[in-house]
Amino acid sequence: MTAIKYKAYSLNNYLSIPQVEKLSARAKRNIEVVSHVFPFKVNNYVIDELIDWDNYENDPIFHLTFPQEGMLLPHHYNKMAGALEQSPDKIFHKETSNKIRVQLNPHPAGQQEHNIPEIDGQKLMGLQHKYRETVLFFPSSGQTCHSYCTFCFRWPQFVGMEELKFAMKETELLIKYLEKHQEVTDILFTGGDPMIMNFKVFQKYIEPFLEDDNKTNIQTIRIGTKSLSFWPYKFLTDDGADDFLRLFERITSKGINLALMAHFSHPRELDTQAVQEAIKRIKRTGAQIRTQSPLLKHINDKPEIWAEMWRKQVNLNCIPYYMFVVRDTGAQHHFAVTLADSWEIWRKAYQNVSGICRTVRGPSMSCTPGKVQVLGVSEINGEKVFVLRFLQGRNPDWVARPFFAKYDEDAIWMDTLEPAFGDSFFFEEEAEMVYGENYYDPQVSSFE
C-alpha cells in the first residue's frame, strides 16, 4: 500500500483544506467560534476518504470532526462570538473560552474527586482506579489524537488548561501501584489516544509487563484508540508500523491478552481499504479488537446504522462491545439522545442482527457510581419504569442487580432519574457514606 504522509488541520490552518471552499460562510463562522471552546483537529485521511463534501450539512463524519453551532448553548456561543468581534487579543479570547469551559462539567463521573489513586501519600494524576479489576493509565505522550471527535468527553485533555488534564510520565510509579494492588488484572492505556505515540515511547510503557520479573497481576492490556478510524496508516505504512505489530505479538505470546478498544461511530469508518487491511494486520498478532461508541444525535441515531455497523465489525473479526450514552459534559445537549429513545434504537438494532453480533452491551451510562445499562421500559404495579442494572460498579456487589427508575421521556442521564419505589436507589446510602452527599451530581451543570 502506498504510504500517505499525515497532515493535520486545526483552527489555525483549516481554511487551506481545498474542500473547505464548499462550506457556507455560516459553517466557517461556526467553526471559528466553537473551536475556541472545544478542541478541533482533523487530518487528510478523514478529509479525503471519509467525508462526503457534496452533502456536508448532513454528513455524519463532518459532524463527528468539524465543530457545529449547536455544540455551544446560545448564550455561550454569543459570549464567545462577541469576544472574537470585540477584540483581536488572544489572551482575552482564551480567558473567555476558559470561563465557558469550566461551566461544562469538564470532569464528569467523579474523575478527579473519586478516581485518582495514591501511593505512599502521592496522588497519581495520570491514573484512574474506579473499578476493582481495572486501572486507566494516561501516558503523558499520548494526550492528543490523530483527529478530535466533536462529542469527546475527554475534551479537557486538549484545550490547554493544565488543571483539567490527566497525564503521567512515571512508569515506575504505575508499576509500583500495580504491584501493590494485585486485584488489578486489566490496565487500559487511554488518553487522548495512545496510538499517537511513536513506537519507542510506547514500548517503554509496555516493556515492564513483558519482563520475567514482572510482579504485577496484569492479565489484559487494553488500548483505547480511534486510530483505526482516523489514521489506519499507523499500522500500515507509518514509521514503526511493523514494530508495533511485532510488539503486539510479543504481548500475546507472553500470555497477556491484548485488546484494542477501537472507537467506531459510523459504518463508513469501516469501508476503506486502509482500515480493513489495518484490522487484518492487527488480528494476525493475536490481539483482539473490541468496538464501542456513544449513541450520537446527528451521527448515528438510527437503529439501521448500528445494525449495519455491528455486522461490518463482526465480518472484519471485530467484537462489538459497547453502545454508550453521551456523557454529561461538554456538548452533551447537542449530541444526546433521550434514554427512552436510546433504548428503542438499541432494541431495534439488536433485533436485526444475528446472535454473533450480540456481544455488544448498552445503552450504557458511565456515571459516578458505575456503568449503568438501560435494560428497558416496563410497567410494574401500574407504574411505567426504566429497568436498569450495573455493568460495572464502584462496589462490585452492585453489578448485575436490577433496579428501577421512574419513567421520564426527557431524561438523558442518570442524575435526573428518580427512584421508582422508595426514596433512593439501592446503592445511594452506601455511596453517600463513602463519597459524600449528592456525590454523583455534576459539579457544574452544562445547562447553567
Image (tube, helix red, strand yellow):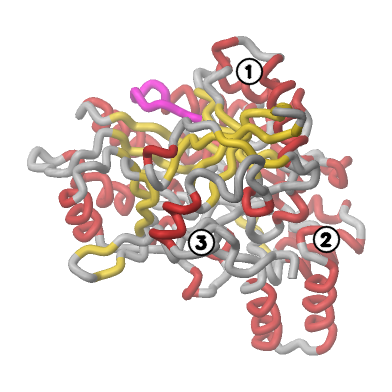
- Find residue 69 and name its label: 2
What secondary structure is found at the residue carrying circle 3? loop
Q: In this view, does 275 lie above or below 421?
A: above
Mark 3 vs mark 1: which is more N-terminal?
1
Q: Is residue 227 left or right of residue 209?
A: right
Q: Which residue is drawn at 34% across and 48% down?
A: 135
- Find residue 8 and name its label: none
Q: Where is residue 191 in the image (x, y as percent from the top left)?
A: 46, 54
Q: Which of marks 3 and 1 is in front?
A: 3
Which residues fall within the magenta stretch? 283-290
Marks 3/1: CA distance? 39 Å
Instruction: Inspect this view and state whether residue 407 appears.
Output: yes
Residue toward you, 410 or 98: 410
Mark 2 vs mark 1: which is more N-terminal?
2
Q: Which residue is drawn at 48% across and 35% down?
A: 391
Q: Where is residue 272 in the image (x, y as percent from the top left)?
A: 64, 28
Q: Quadrant of the C terminus?
A: bottom right
**Disc 3 residue type (three-letter):** Tyr
Q: Nearer the viewer, mark 3 or mark 2?
A: 3
Q: Residue at x 31, y 54 (%)?
A: 201
Q: Residue at x 87, y 46 (%)?
A: 57
Mark 3 vs mark 2: which is more N-terminal?
2
Q: Quadrant of residue 215?
A: top left
